[in-house]
Amino acid sequence: DAGVIQSPRHEVTEMGQEVTLRCKPISGHDYLFWYRQTMMRGLELLIYFNNNVPIDDSGMPEDRFSAKMPNASFSTLKIQPSEPRDSAVYFCASSKTGVWTNTEAFFGQGTRLTVV
Amino acid sequence: RKEVEQDPGPFNVPEGATVAFNCTYSNSASQSFFWYRQDCRKEPKLLMSVYSSGNEDGRFTAQLNRASQYISLLIRDSKLSDSATYLCVVKEEHGGSQGNLIFGKGTKLSVKP
């Protein structure tokens, strides 16, 4: 497996534009997480899905952010309209259910978003 | 709010030193614990899981104290390549947030020649 795949790797956009980040989790993983990382706030959970269903979106900053998981192999995080304070690295991660098996999360390489 | 707290550092140590990182978590129902490592401008990667009885992987030793809700990571004979940020991670296993991974903000380690 190629691991968690995110696209794009880098995105520079103007304030007010719509941004869509994409993620393909590892095949067979039933959990998918979206995180945002900044120097000031560290790694923050935005939302996570289990079997394509959103479980906890309390970390989504505001209505400008939305996330979908239409099937087990694809998820998107959308920001509309984008603002400079959204600039960060956005990570997608996936893991699988288990109690005794190794259930660590595997991260994608991240999308570095800059909003100017 | 469920929290995972770490000393942000930085810890600046010479090669060969022993260094220890600590982490506390607030949710007593948490069941699974991990240490992740993140290199500069890279994604976090699993370093090791933390088991109730404590566990060792080469120069790395992880300990868990459930009564105090405290996790530690010990690195012996530190190498230049150990320089990174170490993230403490707690996985929730019960309730509405089952499966959620909560990350600490990380402890930065810099190993000097």
Image: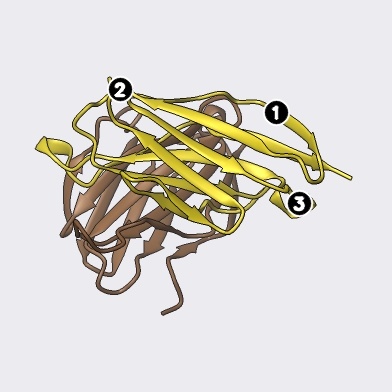
Chain colours: A brown, B yellow
Residue receiving disc 3: B79
Chain bearing tag 2 is B
Asked if marks 1 and 2 touch (Cβ < 8 Å), the reply is no
Going from the N terminus, do you reach mark 1 or mark 2 first? 1
Say which quadrant the C terminus of chain A sits in.
Answer: top right
Residue receiving disc 2: B26
Residue A110 location (% of width, % of height):
52, 54
Check disc 2 and give the amino acid type: Ser
Task: Give the Cα distance between marks 2 and 3.
Answer: 32 Å
Residue A74 got which mark?
none
Q: Secondary structure at mark 1?
A: loop
Residue receiving disc 1: B10
Q: Is residue A96 above or below residue B49?
A: below
In the foreground, A36 or B74: B74
Q: Secondary structure at mark 2?
A: loop
Q: Can residue A116 be spotted in the picture?
A: no
Chain bearing tag 1 is B
Going from the N terminus, do you reach mark 3 or mark 1 first? 1
Say which quadrant the N terminus of chain A sits in.
Answer: bottom left
Question: How many marks overall?
Answer: 3
